[in-house]
Amino acid sequence: MASSKPTSKKEGGIDLKSDSASITGREVAGRDNIKGFSGKEVNLLMETLLKYFDKGYLQDPAKLGSTLSDFRKYHEKLHEYKELHNAVNEIQIDFEQFKTEIDRATFTRSISKLSTLRKLWRPVSLKVTALLKWSQTIQSIGKPFKILEDKSRSGEEWAIQFSGLQSRMNEHLGMDEQSGDTSKKEAEYPSQMQILAYQSLGRRDLAWWETLSELTSAFQHTWSHHMNAADKQLRETAQELYNLSNKALSNI
């Protein structure tokens, strides 16, 4: 007796010629299964997936969904780490000019004018402010940055450290934290007598300048450390994405 089963369907597999598709004998899509798509359109989708994904993924919808979710997760992480890298790099470019002036003055035992220091620090501070504003929106590489009601900071280590150093440097130079303009609170810049004693009488230190040098060194270490960390995370995430692609897209 002849079988009454439709010849257009394939038992236990995928038939891309029928009006509906089945996987391991179970209907997964057809005219009435996916609103807005015909059986032909669903079959075209299946053909496309089969070009790139191993058949095992299509036989396990949960596995396929998890894999596609991982693709999206890695791409979002790559994007945010790239944004972090670029922001820290922009800070570094402006900071180098500030640090060069500090190094020059220290070597020659001269004290840079406060107006010069403020002019060189202002673009650095504004770039840090831009980084911190962006860090409030991150979703894939850690906790968004926040300044809490008690003035404490919450978020990723890089955001907390940049914010803390920016505040300390701005306060030391007598600059407003947000705009980078001169603040109402005057900087405790050394007097002419103190500067002359430092330059001419061989005094070994000048407290205000020593603090500025320490803050500069701390900022140098911070951007260097977090630039290297961002680069490492970029490489690791790219490798994870490559490994996932190599595993899932084995048909390419």
Image (cartoon, grey):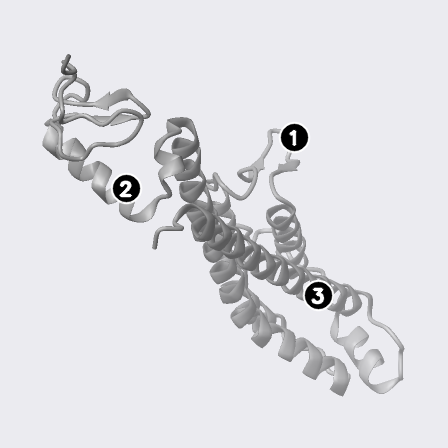
Disc 1 target residue: 150
Image quarter where the C terminus lies is bottom left
Say which amino acid is labelled 1.
Asp
Q: Nearer the viewer, mark 2 or mark 1?
A: 2
Residue at image position (57%, 71%) is 115
Q: Are marks 1 and 3 in contact (CB under 8 Å)?
A: no
Residue at image position (65%, 65%) is 224
Mark sitting earlier along the chain (2/3): 2
Image quarter where the N terminus lies is top left
Q: Would residue 145 be found to the left or right of residue 79 on screen?
A: right
Mark sitting earlier along the chain (1/3): 1
Residue 6 picture location, percent across and down: 13, 20
Which of 16/234 is in front?
A: 16
Residue 235 picture location, percent across and down: 55, 59
- C-alpha separation, residue under disc 2 versus residue under disc 1: 53 Å
Say which amino acid is labelled 2.
Leu
- C-alpha separation, residue under disc 2 versus residue under disc 3: 68 Å
How packed mark 3 is, by other alpha carbons closer than 10 Å (few <14, some 14-19, many 20 or more), is: some
Question: SS at mark 1?
Answer: loop
Which of 11/200 is in front?
A: 11
* Residue 181 in view in this figure: no
Q: Which mark is residue 189?
A: 3
Disc 2 target residue: 49
How packed mark 1 is, by other alpha carbons closer than 10 Å (few <14, some 14-19, many 20 or more), is: few
Mark sitting earlier along the chain (2/1): 2
Which of 131/175 is in front?
A: 131
232 shown above or below 37: below
